[in-house]
Amino acid sequence: MKKFIMAAVGGTLAGIILTTQVAAPLLAQEADKKVNVYEQLDLFGDIFERIRAQYVEEVDEGDLIKAAINGMLTSLDPHSSYLSPDDANDMRVQTRGEFGGLGIEVTQEEGFVKVVSPIDGTPADEAGIEAGDFITHVDGESILGLALDGAVEMMRGPVGSEIIVTIVREGEAEPFDVSIIRDTIKLTAVRSRAEGQTVVLRVTTFNDQTTPNLEEKLAKEVEELGGMDNVNGFVIDLRNNPGGLLTQAIRVSDAFLEKGEIVSTRGRDPADGDRFNATPGDLAMGKPVVVLINGGSASASEIVAGALQDHRRAIVIGTKSFGKGSVQTVMPLRSNGAMRLTTARYYTPSGRSIQALGVSPDIIVEQPRRAPEAEDEAEKESISRRNRSESDLRGSLDNDSLTEDEIRQIEADREKAKRAAQLRDDDYQLAYAIDILKGLSALGSDK
């Protein structure tokens, strides 16, 4: 028995010695890491002092430190950055829906400033800026190599002032200049209209106004159509929507889902992950939904499209979305500044990350470029002749087989068909979405 006790104690002692032997190198490595960090910080201090004392021109110490902080953050990914007190205040104002500027959302791609999307009805949109454009110069000055915040700063200016941006666009042989007049940007988060029996909800951004606007506009359009029985479906247009607040993306998705996961976020520590689920209630009351996306649909837009697609609640139509699948947390700092730091990736209900991949539409529909208008009167006359019919001929016979009411109905149907044809010319993707809903409605009425 004594031998057994001694063996057991011996084993315990050996275990302690072994643990100490294993832990010691780990502790030493951790200590070395700390020493290395302090050495790097000392190096930073040395360089800062050398610049301050010996640079060819006198420098602003505050600007140096701010640039160093921003450089540290922007080296992580395109969406992490330092926000000065003014920038932090601008961001808070933007989430409320009104601010000054051009009306474009930009990112940085391999050192180039890339347009994520122009915002509807803003100076940039009216000037013809498109998603995917690259901005190379501002007022003739190159912005290549500038940090994103620096490039954005160059594009800022007083409301009413002019800015010339040089654009490189796929399909264009040469860069070209675009003149834009800066203005106060008043974002209307949701616009709505009825196209026949289809309610079109154009969601331009995800700010504090988005969900209340969506609910209000949807109810208004349904009421004007005479109730939900007269609605064949809904189009949620997220094209060129650069995103915004995660909370609003969740609420918009929830508005069309009865249950199930909407989105999950996962950070470096698994314990920090979040999962957001839908609550009962569907604003569309089960009517078919089509979501429109394109390369300018990013972030919060992709959350909505991915959630409705995974739950088979909507058919997603258009082209592949932008592919921003990361979550930024804005952390207040002293002196009223802030730090925007990427803290998590988000995942659609099926568990897919869209980071760098985007949401792929169920049906790919390209938006054709506008055909050039007829250039001269002769060409316009030729088109007019091709569109003439029997009724345009002088002295043509009347149709005596129809009543006046029947003729009026035919003319009304013809006008409706003309409007549909015009919509295909104006916005082919939207026309395609509406045709899908008409087809689904026709199938449902045959049951």
Image (spheres, rainbow, N blue to C red):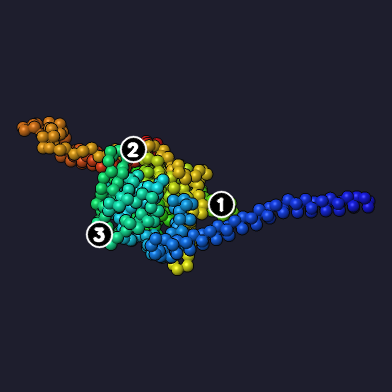
Name the N-terminal-most of marks 2 and 1. 1
User: Could you tell me which residue is drawn at 29 percent across and 60 percent down?
Assistant: 157
Cα–Cα span, label 2 and label 1? 37 Å
- Mark 3 Cα-neighbour bin, 10 Å: few <14, some 14–19, many ≥20: few
**Secondary structure state at the residue bearing disc 3:** loop
Q: Would residue 379 be visible to someone looking at this image?
A: yes
Q: Nearer the viewer, mark 3 or mark 2?
A: 3
Q: Quadrant of residue 220?
A: bottom left
* Viewer-proximal residue among 166 and 443: 166
Circle 3 is placed at which residue position?
161
Q: Amino acid at mark 1?
A: Arg
| Spatial separation of the CA atoms under disc 3 and disc 2 | 35 Å
Q: Which residue is mark 2?
A: 366
**Labels 2 & 1 near each other (Cβ < 8 A):** no
Q: Between residues 81 and 5, which one lies in front from this camera angle?
A: 81
Give the class, few, some or many, for how many residues have Cα within 10 Å of label 2's Cα (few <14, many ≥20): few
The amino acid marked with disc number 2 is: Glu
What is the CA distance from the residue labelled 3 to the residue labelled 1? Answer: 44 Å
Tell me, for residue 268, which label it has, or none: 1
Q: Are marks 3 and 1 in contact (CB under 8 Å)?
A: no
